[in-house]
Amino acid sequence: MPQITYRKALNDAFAEELERDENVVLIGEEIAEYNGAYKVTEGLHARFGDRRVMDTPISEAAFCGLGIGASMLGIRPVIELMFWSFSYVAFDQLFNNAPMVRYMSGGLINVPIVVRGPANGGTNVGATHSHTPENFAAYTPGLKVVCPATAYDAKGLMKTAIRDNDPVFVMENTLLYGQKWEVPEEEYLIPLGRADVKKEGTDISLIAHGRCVITCLEAARQLKEDHDIDAEVLDLRSIRPLDQEAILKSVRKTNRAVLVEENKPFCGTAAQIAALIQEHAFDHLDAPVRRVSAYDAPQIYSKPLEDEMIPNTRRIIKTVLEVL
Amino acid sequence: MNKKTSQTTAKSAKKKSTAQSKGKLSGVNASLSRDDKIKLYRDMGRIRRFEERSLHAYQQGKIGGFLHLYIGQEAIAVATASLMGDNDHIITAYRDHGQALSVGMGMNECMAELYGKFTGCSKGKGGSMHYFAPDKNFWGGHGIVGGQTPLGTGIAFALKYKKLEGCCLCLLGDGAVNQGAFHESLNLAALWNLPVIYIIENNRYSMGTSQKRSSAGSPLARRAEGYDMAWELIDGSSVYEIREKLAPIMDRARTQPEPAVVEIQTYRYRGHSVADANHEKYRSKKEIEDYKKNHDPIMLFQRTLAEEGVLSDADIEEIDREAKKEAADSARFADESPFPPEEEIFTDVYWEVDHKTGKNEGRIFFND
Ligand SMILES: Cc1ncc(C[n+]2csc(CCOP(=O)(O)OP(=O)(O)O)c2C)c(N)n1
Ligand SMILES: [Mg+2]
C-alpha cells in the first residue's frame, strides 16, 4: 500500500468529493491561488477552477455564515479555517447558527457543511493561535466533531463528513500534515462514531484523539520496552458521535484507563469520557481513571515550556506508572 | 482630509510628497531639531537591523513559530510614535516589532521574547505577535486579524471617559479591514465621537492575497464615509509626510474628539512571515525591487537628511554601525538568558492568584 502524508490524504479526499458531487465547494483564506497556508488544498484550484475552490477575504464570520446559508439550498461547502483558533471570530455562525437551524425549523432545513482546519498547540505560536475547541463543539448538540490521527483516518473520515447531512467540524493538526501512513488507492469511507484500536493491549487503556493518539502509541512502545506494560491505545476518531461501546469494551478488558487529550482539563473531552466510564464500567475499574490533558493555562509561547504543557510521552508514562 | 465624498485624495496622494521636497519644512516638521531628525532616522534603522538579526536567529533555529517582519514599513512606526504625547496610545496587530521599538521598548527584551526567554518583554509568554508595553502606552501586539480594532476603540473610550485629552492610534493591515469587528468599531467610534484613529498600513497584500482580490472598493479608507467619518491617504515612504498629515488628525481626535480612518501606503519586502516561501509568486520580483530601490523609507529619509545637511556620510555609517551592534548584542543577551521556569506557566493567568489575595475560595486550576 502506498504511503502518503496526512496532508495528501486530505487533498485526495477533497479531489474525490469535488469530482463526485457538483455541489461540493471549497471555501477559505489562501486555499486557492496560494494553495493553502499549509498546502492542504494544493493543486485543487488549478484542477477545479474558481467556481469550486474559492479564496476569501479575512472575514471568518461572513464566509462561515455564507457556507451555512448556501448549505440550506443544497450546496456542500467545505470551509477551511486557517486555524481553528480563528473560529472564535465566527463563533455565532458556527455555534449558534449551524447547529440550531435544523432543530428550530423542526427538521425542515439541514446544514450539510464541513468546517475544517488545524486545531493544535505545540508549534510555538502563542496563546491566540493554539486553541483546541473540539470540546466546545462536542458540547453543542447539533454539531459533529472529528479529530483524525492518521492519514488513513483523515481521508476516510473527511469523505464521510462531506457526505454527512449535518454540520461536521473536522479538527486536523499542523504537526501531522507532513507525517506519512499507508493509505489504499481504492475508495473507502470511515463512518463517524467508530473508534479504532490502534494497538491492542491488556494492562491499561490509553484513550485519545488526534495527535495524542500518536503520542500514546509512542508511550505504549516505551512502556512495553522499559516496564513490560502492555497498553492498549484506543483512538476515538470522532468525539461526537462517540463510540461509547469501544471505550467501555477496552476498559472492561484492561480495567484501567488513562485519558490523553490536548484539551485543557476543565470540561475537556476527557472529562466526559471519564464520566461515561464511571457511569457504565465502574465495577470493572481497578484504579481511578486518570487524565493527561494540556496544562490548565493559556498556551505559553516559550517552546520548551509549551512542549511540557501539552501531553508528551514523559507525562503519559508517569501517569500510567502511578495507576498501575 | 476627506469628509463624505472626495475624489481628490487618491490622486493627491500619488503626487510627489510636498513634505519631503527640498525647501522649508512645514507643519509639525518645521519645529524638528537636528537631534529629533536624527532620532527618526536612527529608529528606522534600528528596527531594520533588529529584524534582520531576528531573521538570522530564526534561520539558526533559535526562534520558532511565526515571525512577521516589518521591513519596508518602518517609517509608519517611527512617525506615529514620534507624534504621541503622554495621553496618546497605540495598539497594533502581530507585525509589531516596529511599533515596539519606536515607542521605546528595548531591543534586549524584544529579542529575548522572540527566543521565548524569561527576560523577554512578556517573560517568554507572548512571542513575536504579542508584545506589550503599557508603561509606554503600547497595548500590543495582537495575533487575531482585526481583533485589536475594538480594543483600540475601547482605549479611546476610556480616554474620553476619563476626560483626558489624548487619542488612540489603532493600526491594522489592509486585510484586516474585512473583519466585521473593524466595521462595528468604526460605527461605535463615529456614533460616540471617540478619539481613535484607525491607521490602515496598506502594504498591498494580506498574506498571498492582493488588495484587489480581497477588498471591494478603493481606497480602503473611504469605507469611513459610510460612517460619516473623516479619512486620509498618506504616502508611507516618507516619515515627514506621515507626520505632517497625521498630526492635525491627531489634534482633532484629541480636542473634538473625532475619529478618523487613515490609510498609509507602504510595502513589506519580506514574505508575510518568515515561513512564507511563496512571496515571489503572488507578486513579482520586479515589484519588490522597485519598492526597495525607489520607495525605501530609510533610504529616502537618509537622502533628505543628507540634502538638509543634517547627516554626513560618516554619521550615516556610525548610526548604522551602532544599530547593528545593538541588534547583535540583543541576540547575545537573548541567547544567554534563561527560559522561564516551569511554574511560570501558571502565573499571570489570574490577578488574584498572582497577588495571593486569598479572595478565591474555590479551586482555580485543574491539573490533577
Ligand atoms: C481571524 C484571523 N484570520 C486569519 C489569520 C491568519 N492571518 C494572519 S495575518 C493574515 C493576513 C493579514 O493581512 P493584513 O491585514 O494586510 O496585514 P499584514 O500581514 O499585511 O501586515 C492572515 C490571513 C489570523 N491571524 N486571524
Ligand atoms: Mg497587508
Image (spheres, rainbow, N blue to C red):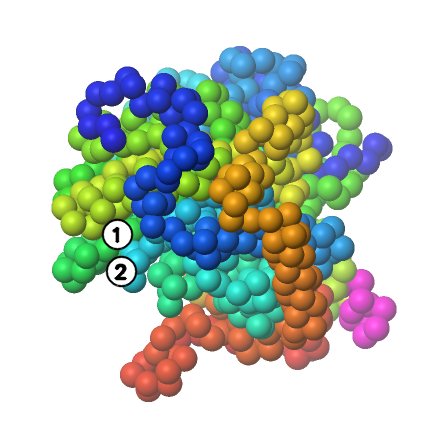
Name the one closer to the observer, B57 or A106. Answer: B57
Label 2 sits on a secondary structure element that is loop
Mark 2 Cα-neighbour bin, 10 Å: few <14, some 14–19, many ≥20: few
At x 37%, y 82%, the residue is B355
How many numbered marks have been drawn onto this rendered protein structure?
A: 2
Q: What residue lies at 51% left-to-right and 13% top-to-bottom?
A: A51
Q: Quadrant of residue A310?
A: bottom right
Q: What chain is tagged by disc 2?
A: B
Quadrant into which the C terminus of chain A falls = bottom right
- In three-dimensional space, the C-alpha distance between marks 1 and 2, rounded to whole angstroms, equals 7 Å
Q: Position of residue B94 (x, y in %)?
A: 49, 49
Decide: few, some or many residues near mark 1? Use Cα within 10 Å; few <14, some 14-19, many ≥20.
many
Q: Quadrant of residue A238?
A: top right
Give the chain letter at badge 1. B
Residue B297 counted in the magenta span: no
What secondary structure characterizes most of the magenta part?
A: helix
Residue range of the region highlighted in magenta in the rendering: A220-229
Q: Nearer the viewer, residue A225 or B212?
A: B212
Q: Position of residue A17 (x, y in %)?
A: 60, 21
Confirm or reject: label 2 Cβ below 8 Å from ligand 1.
Answer: no
Contact between marks 1 and 2 (CB within 8 A): the answer is: yes
Q: Amino acid at mark 2?
A: Asn
Q: What residue is disc 1 on?
A: B167
Describe residue B253's horizontal placement relative to residue A149 as left or right. Answer: left
Label of residue A191 in the image: none
Identify which residue, B133 or B123, lies in the foreground: B133
**Which residue is disc 2 drawn over?**
B87
Instruction: Decide which of tag 1 and tag 2 comes sooner along the chain.
Output: 2
Callout 1 amino acid: Cys
Percent of width and height locating residue B113:
57, 63
Please state if A56 lies on the left or on the right of B279 as rendered.
left
Query: Residue, x 51% and y 30% (percent of image)?
Result: B205
